Image (cartoon, rainbow, N blue to C red):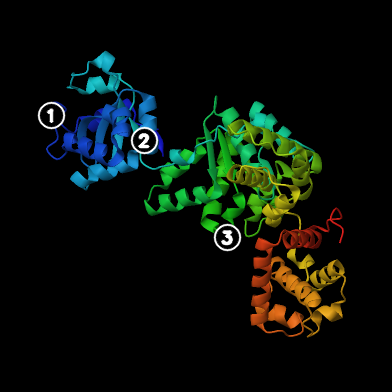
Amino acid sequence: MVLTELSPTKMNNTFTKKNLNNLNSENINWNLIQKEMKDKLGTEIYESWLKKINFIEDLNNYILLSVPTRFIRDWITSRYLDQILQIVRNYKKNIIRIEFKIVDKETTGSNEKITNTQNFENTEKISFIKDSYLQYNRIDPNKRFDNFLTGSSNKLAFEASLKVSENISHYNPLYIYGGVGMGKTHLLNSIGLETKKNNKVMFISAERFMYQFVKSIKSNDMVKFKEYFRNTDILLIDDIQFMNGKEAMQEEFFHTFNALLEKGSQIIVSADRAPSKLSRIQERIKSRFSGGLVVDIQKPDFDLRKKIVEFKTDELNKLYTDHIKISREIQDYISTEVTGSIRELVGAINRIISFSRIYKKVPNLSETKIILKDLLNLSENKVTIDLIQTLVCKFFKISKNEMLSSRRSRYLVRPRQTAIYLTKILTSKSLPEIGREFSNRDHTTIIHSVKTIEKLKEKDPEMLQNIDKLKNHILYNNKDNEI
């Protein structure tokens, strides 16, 4: 939300427009509004926060309210102002905004009425909050520098972020880029946490910046938009690539960028690619990005993946009271096989922990592979029907010609059904496609084969074991389970 304050002179001019001795508006019944706030927002919120609001005056198209502290004002405006305004508009439709004044009852007296403009001039300035920027500027206290794990792939980005936090405008702008789930947002959040102690910080996504820009144009309030974003000390913008193709917004961002650089503010930007590779972004903006420090975050190497897995495993073990321990074998397997991103690593650990808590046991390696199938560094095109047929024939010691023949001997039917079943679950081929690869068999034969193996797995432990061995060998080329 935009937060500005009226000067004493402006306040004086505003309040002399009406007789301040008459504080009870004929149009606003604050008791009814309070009752409705309590009903709609809940007793707990009302008693904790909204009850502290007092009505002062109805001034044409806005109302003046008072609260005892600046903290209460900021809390209410960042969370409940939109709902309060809507409730007020139910009683008087021409109200378009709410203004707050800080009135300390200990110094003014709880029953004292304000009877002249001098009282307003001698107390704290009025805060005007019209839009809703503040609620999108929430920095996550859990994403800090001290819990950002570093390795060779992200150390430069980490060190640069730390340096910016210690010495504003040392690198300006700082441009951090990398793939999805690599920790870019974590670093921006960490910078915000460190610098907000002594600076005015704005942390916003490019998508939210665009939303506020469009909203300001529609409400004819671009002056407030410009003032808000150009008066910050630290501007952090996440996922700048989403600004692509939006010319009007890029124009505004360019001028905001220049204004902040001129006044010595720090700008930190994140994206999924290098500045030169941004598509449909103005060349002058890409040039500004390239003029600062550009650092990338690469995929985590094995050492960093192992460090992350160990850290997150310990963290989750402390969180859950049942203390389900993931074996070192599984930790090493996840570190080795899940190579995509840090987010995928954390997701893999969460899946294993969830499995353990649901089934009251830690999965073995074979179960782990199935749980994490879609996260593993495998592509489906490596699993072909020909590969499945070859490995199944080798396992059952028959030839491929025998498997694909029309013969219905028992020693051929079971391997054929097994190969069809594995093809169905390990590839995305349709039933007719599978049928064609098995000597043009009908799709009903394929369905029958799949159902037969599924039933046998439930009744025959040896069949279940054979299927698992074959699946592991097909998917992971697992040499521990020799065929």
Mark 1 / mark 3, whichever is N-terminal = 1
Amino acid under disc 2: Thr
Side (left or right) of 212 relative to 387 = left
Rendered image: mark on residue 245: 3
Corner quadrant of residue 132: top left
Residue at 83% in and 59% down: 477
Q: Quadrant location of the N terminus?
A: top left
Q: Is residue 249 above or below residue 467?
A: above
Neighbourhood count class around disc 2 (C-alpha, 10 Å): few under 14, some 14–19, many 20 upward? many
The reply to whether callout 2 and callout 1 are in contact (CB within 8 Å) is no
- The mark closer to the camera, 3 or 2, is 2
Instruction: Tell me the residue that label 2 is attached to.
Output: 77
Estimate the x, y position of residue 150 in percent, counting from the top left: 74, 35
- Along the viewing direction, whichever of 157 and 319 lies nearer the viewer: 319
Amino acid under disc 3: Gly
Spatial CA distance of label 3 from label 2 is 33 Å
Q: Secondary structure at mark 3?
A: loop
Q: Secondary structure at mark 2?
A: helix
Q: Secondary structure at mark 1?
A: loop
Estimate the x, y position of residue 156 in percent, counting from the top left: 76, 37
